[in-house]
Image (cartoon, helix red, strand yellow):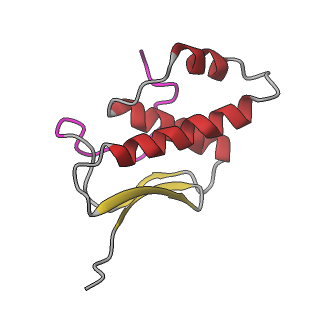
Amino acid sequence: MEPINKRVTKILGKQGGLPTEPGVYIDDSASSAEDLDKDIIAFAEEYGFQLTPADRDELLDTESEDYYQILTEIADSAVEWLNDHNQDETVYWLVEDNSLFLGKLEDEG
């Protein structure tokens, strides 16, 4: 299935798994939270995140009063999925300032 939104600004390393270079991977700072959620889902789908058929149906029903809540919950699940599938344990995915970042854990030593 095609990702629901292909407007992703920086995608690296698709062939070799998730990116490991810290930085901004989706910059939607000038866009809406809805755009960011859609872009996060599309980004995660590029790496193997799969929507259930029920989730896909709910995302198509943009007139539903629960649409934005469902969209946010699925995007949160996509970020969790990205973190669960990191091969580099020194980095982590986070959403901040309406953007998706790959951060680096600091050494505590």
Q: Position of residue 23 (x, y in %)?
A: 36, 62
Q: Quadrant for residue 96, please give it.
A: bottom right
Predominant SS along the magenta part: loop
Q: Is residue 34 above or below residue 109?
A: above
Q: How far across and down, in percent of the image, does residue 93 sit?
A: 41, 55
Residue drawn 47% across the image and 57% down it? 94
Q: Is residue 105 above or below residue 101?
A: below
Residue 98 x %, y %: 59, 55
Looking at the image, how many numbered discs can be counted on the residues?
Answer: 0
The residue positioned farthest toward the bottom in the image shown? 109
Res 10 seen here: no
Task: Give the residue at x 66% y 40%.
Answer: 34
Q: Residue at x 41, y 36 (%)?
A: 44
What span is in magenta? Answer: 1-16
Query: Residue 27, image x and y in percent?
Result: 50, 54
The quarter of the rendered structure image containing the C terminus is: bottom left
Q: Is residue 26 magenta?
A: no
Q: Is residue 3 visible?
A: yes
Of 68 and 109, which appears nearest the observer? 109
